[in-house]
Image (tube, rainbow, N blue to C red):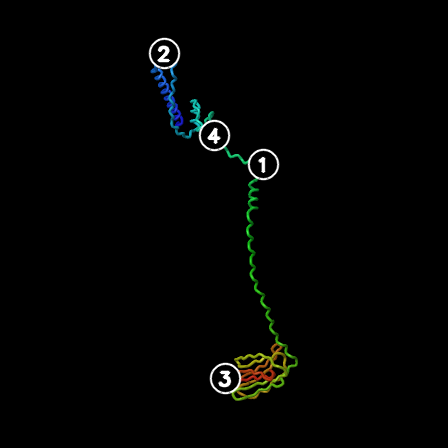
Amino acid sequence: MNKIFLWIVLAVIILGLLLILLNTRMGQSGDAPIPADNSVSAPVKPAPPVAQPPLPVTPGTPADGEKLAAAGVKPSPAAVERGFALETGEETPATAESPAPVSPGTTPLTAAAHDEKALAAAPAAPAAPAEVKKAEKPAPKPQPAPRKAAPAPKNQTITNFVVFVRDGGATIRLDASSPIRFKHLELTSPSRVVVDLQGTWKLSEPGVPKGEMVKDVRLGKKGSDTRIVIDLHAKAKTRYILTKGKKRLDIRLDKTK
């Protein structure tokens, strides 16, 4: 509607100017003196047209273009540039971007090919550092096997087995043909001392003199060992003493206070 109104105003102004020019020419012709016979009147120069300021142009709609076309008014080049067609009055669509021409003999680059090309051009990622192997602990050194006890020699003999009585105690002495290896144990209820000689020994029961400490001496076996049991009258303090290259064993029995 604004466009139509502007065109109507423009048309009215143009018609007004034309009427003013026409009245001016008619007034000049009426005031001019009547020329004499065979005289030619000087030509009258028309007044120069008055320059009009350009009207503001606002964007139109397809409906405005249709109305102008129906009124027989031709839109200005500026209106045409803003999208009004002469015949239909519809807004001309913007020109779509034309694809770039492809030279013959070349294949258009697809999206997948573009990704592969980008991956090939990208710098290779640095390789992950290899895992540092943990230092393995050194295998423990093999421990030496415990030494086995040397087997007892055959034909072991107790050459002397005697009981000595003394004041406040007694001593039992064993002399052997080979070194003596033994274990001992003190028991109560009744009080007694047990000595196990390693291996088989040849010996006989000693005589037991009367005394305050030793009551009796008995011999026996415990597995492959030879056992000596010393029965006591009372509990005693016991000491074991090996001498002469471990071939003599003294068992000292003392009264306890």
Q: Nearer the viewer, residue 239 or 76?
A: 76
Q: Give the answer, above or below, for where 11 lies relative to 217.
A: above
Q: Which of 88 and 10 is in front in this view?
A: 10
Identify which amino acid the numbered label 2 is placed on: Ala
Q: Name the residue under label 4.
A: 92
Disc 3 to disc 1: CB gap under 8 Å: no
Of callouts 1 and 2, the N-terminal one: 2
Picture quadrant of residue 164: bottom right
| Marks 2/3: CA–CA distance | 192 Å
| Marks 1/4: CA–CA distance | 31 Å
Residue at the left extreme?
Answer: 31
Q: What element carries label 4?
A: loop
| Marks 1/2: CA–CA distance | 84 Å
Q: Name the residue under label 3.
A: 256
- Select label 1 or label 4 by which is in front: 1
Of callouts 3 and 1, the N-terminal one: 1
Identify which amino acid the numbered label 1 is placed on: Ser
Of callouts 2 and 3, the N-terminal one: 2
Q: Name the residue under label 2.
A: 36
Q: Position of residue 126 (x, y in %)?
A: 55, 52
- Select label 3 or label 1 by which is in front: 1
Of callouts 1 and 4, the N-terminal one: 4
Identify which amino acid the numbered label 3 is placed on: Thr
The residue carrying pointer 2 sits among few (fewer than 14), some (14 to 19) or many (20 or more) residues within 10 Å by Cα, namely: few
Q: What element carries label 2?
A: loop
The residue carrying pointer 4 sits among few (fewer than 14), some (14 to 19) or many (20 or more) residues within 10 Å by Cα, namely: some
Q: Mark 1 points at which residue?
A: 103
Q: Where is residue 20 in the image (x, y as percent from the top left)?
A: 36, 20
| Marks 3/1: CA–CA distance | 125 Å
